[in-house]
Amino acid sequence: MSTHARLLAEALSARTDDDLAALFGRREVRPDAGWHDFFDAAEALLDPTSVARVLPRLTRAEVAGLVAAASGADPGAVADALRTLALLSPSGATLPPTVAAAVAARDTVAGPIIPGDESVSADLPKSADEPESARAAERAFTTVATLADALLLAEEGPLALLAGGTVGLSEKRRLSERGLPEDPALLDDVLALGTAAGLLRPIERTLRLSDAGAAWLRLPGPERWSRLVAGFRTALPEVLRTRNGGWIPLADWHAEHPWDPSWPARIDGLIRQARLLGLITDESSDGTAAETPWAEAPRRGADPDPSALAAYVPAEVDRIFLQNDLTAIAPGPLLPALDLRLRGMATRESASQASSYRFTADSLSTALSSGETEEGVLDFLEGLSLTGVPQPLRYLLAQSASRHGQVQVGTDPATGRTRVRSRDLHLLQAIGVDQALRPLGLVPDDTGEDAAALTTRVNRDTVFWALTDEHYPAALVDAAGAVERPVRTTTESAPPPPADAQRYAALIARLREAREGNPDAAWLERELEHAAKQRAVIAVEVAMPDGTARELVLEVTGFGGGRVRGRDGASDVERTLPIRSILSTRAIEDAGS
């Protein structure tokens, strides 16, 4: 073991900083690892626990090469990759003992397959027929609409995440109550697609709408689908990607990490997501799925082209019918930008190829609180409606506008606290006792300046949106009392994680600094310290004062203070030797004793 560790330590010290950082990243080394020199690094990388941790991360080709090396055969084209991972000896194709033991405990795999090679599977994916393509297109259409609903709910408030990174059952129940599918697994897959495309950002155990997500909501349906497919492809594990940017045949996905027990479940999830995007059909009786016409371009690495998909989905419309019962009917999928604004002033009651919306006092009050004006709503509806704006809707809008602003939310410049004011004392009392608003900590103003006010330490925007979400006619005001147009904040793109070179810079610098000393002396001290811990019997070559060298066989009993202590079995005495006088050591078994 010590011989392998020393050879690896020397090989590590010869690598560039970037190569070391890449190795440490692949081997999941902690940046704060307590290593002092390259010998520490080598021993840690050869430790059975570290080896067992990296084996599940190996690709099918790497596993096949490692199994070949374990049997004494040539590991093939992946030999350099395995040496890079410190799983093969630096100067050959043999395995260190701990690696060999770990491989022996694993199942072998079939012949090596080079990931990313388009010749892996000789057969092209089966093409979907007309009915299968139609069903896949309808599923893609539904997925895009479902994700849009989820993003709108995430805009209202972040979605709580469990420790594992998924949305909890209670949160999924809330989403289902707002019209999203009741299938928890389906919600996980839809939200995963949104996260892969950068539309949702996981931040501090919450899932938040990003700026890219807010922009995506206003895109036409086909372009929405294209962005999702591009995000799905980019987020695929590298082993599934081809050299030209596409992906390998789905039939090969499950086999690409044969020693990773979590890999099959991960691939099952990715295949479900591909099915939700309409890239593949449902499995046939033989267990295979066909590829849809619009999946070929992204599979080969080209930009997704939604034109073939668009032929199977209903065309988007830009007109609605307004009715006297305060409802609106869209004769087809409404253009997303129009749908988004309409849903800001009306509640959508049904969603399909033809959607219906209902105007209520609460929905119009919410629209006004979000920055709409009575004139702006009327202009929008008149330009959108094929039937004009019915009188009942005009009356309800005027009534809502007259009530709007009864509750004003601003910041007290003297105290910095948020102040909620209203001329309607009964309305203010209702806000004060509303259990849904209890987390805001609203209390009556005790300054005596304004009896018709509540104050809180919570910031102004949070209080305003909480009141709006509870359908109170709130308005956001500045220090002078002028009404402001509120804007719901979205989440900026999260900064990318630091590169491996940055994460491991301090660790690599420490290893380099230790290397500047005497590596032979450092290795000798390490061997003696290890022998002392094991009370091992070793042969030491000692430099004598007369310039000669003498070999002693010692059972090492102590090490420290620049000296090593041990019992000399030949003379049965305890010897203490300065480390500087020891020229070399070797295991006593090597001496033939």
Image (cartoon, grey):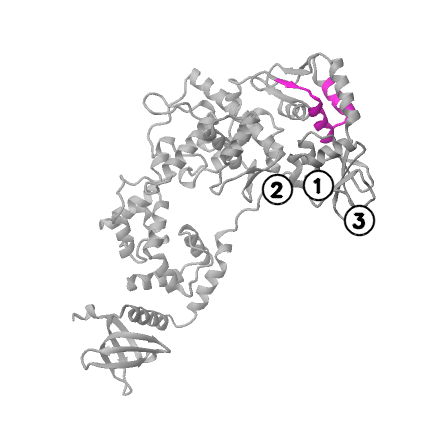
Q: Secondary structure at mark 2?
A: loop
**Type of amino acid under label 1:** Leu
In which quadrant is the C terminus drawn? bottom left
Return the residue at label 3: 414
Q: Please name whichever residue, 64 or 99, is drawn nearer the observer in this view of the structure.
A: 99
Give the spatial CA distance, label 2 vs label 3. 32 Å
Q: Which mark is residue 492?
A: 2
Q: Secondary structure at mark 1?
A: loop
Toward which corner of the image does residue 536 lie, by quadrant? bottom left
Q: Earlier in the sequence, mark 3 or mark 1?
A: 3
**Type of amino acid under label 2:** Glu
Residue 240, position in %: x, y?
40, 37
Residue 255, position in %: x, y?
33, 37
Give the spatial CA distance, label 2 vs label 1. 30 Å
Return the residue at label 1: 442
**Type of amino acid under label 3:** Ala
Q: Please name whichever residue, 327 or 321, is drawn nearer the observer in this view of the structure.
A: 327
Tag 3 near tag 1, CB within 8 Å: no
In which quadrant is the N terminus drawn? bottom left
For the point 77% across and 17% down, which residue is it?
A: 395
Give the spatial CA distance, label 3 vs label 1. 18 Å
Q: Is residue 422 above or below residue 312?
A: below
Q: Is residue 369 shown in magenta?
A: yes
Tag 2 near tag 1, CB within 8 Å: no
Q: Secondary structure at mark 3?
A: loop
